[in-house]
Image (cartoon, helix red, strand yellow):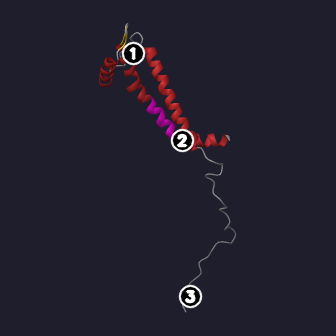
Amino acid sequence: MNYKIKKAFKDNKKYIIVFLVLWVVLEILLCMPMAVAINNSTHADGFYFSEFIGNFGSEIMSFSSFTKLGQEGVMPILGRCTLGLTIIFLVFSSIGIIRSKPRNEFKDIENGSSDWSEGGEQYKIKRRTIW
């Protein structure tokens, strides 16, 4: 059973790297602006969704969420968003790896022997005679 997991990780190494790069990009372009927009839309009397939509759009377009991460209350929101994104990516990558694991250990092994024709047993093309 262990060979299936090793083979699945070996075959999917490039997809795992692509998933990690996509996770980092979404973290920067989606989670950071969302955390800043949620923090700016939350007031003492509650959360305003219409204000969140406006803030989220402006944060994504201006790329200013990096400078606003130091505001009070942004880091816990960013942590929850990161946790959610990580769980979603782990679920999807686990499903992909599980579905791609080999059914048996003989998946990529050649059937038969390749050295059967050694020692004079090779086929020879005979000269064609004309009648």
Q: Which residue is mark 3?
A: 129
Location of the C terminus (image quadrant) = bottom right
Amino acid at pointer 1: Leu
Label 3 to label 1, Cα distance in Å?
87 Å
Mark 2 or 3, closer to the camera: 2
Numbered circle sitting on residue 101: none
Identified at 56% across, 42% down, the residue is 99
Please provide the residue range marked out in magenta. 11-23
69 falls in the magenta region: no
Per the image, is 20 magenta?
yes
Q: How many marks?
A: 3
The three-letter amino acid code for the residue at tag 3 is Thr
Q: Position of residue 73 (x, y in %)?
A: 42, 11
Indicate the secondary structure of the residue bearing disc 1. loop
Mark closest to the chain's N terminus, 1 or 2 = 2
Residue annotated with mark 1: 69
In screen coordinates, is 33 left or right of 21?
A: left
Give the quadrant of residue 126.
bottom right
Task: Say which label, 3 or 1, has the lower sequence index.
Answer: 1
Q: Which residue is mark 2?
A: 12
Residue at 66 percent of width and 42 percent of height: 3
Percent position of residue 84, x then y: 48, 24
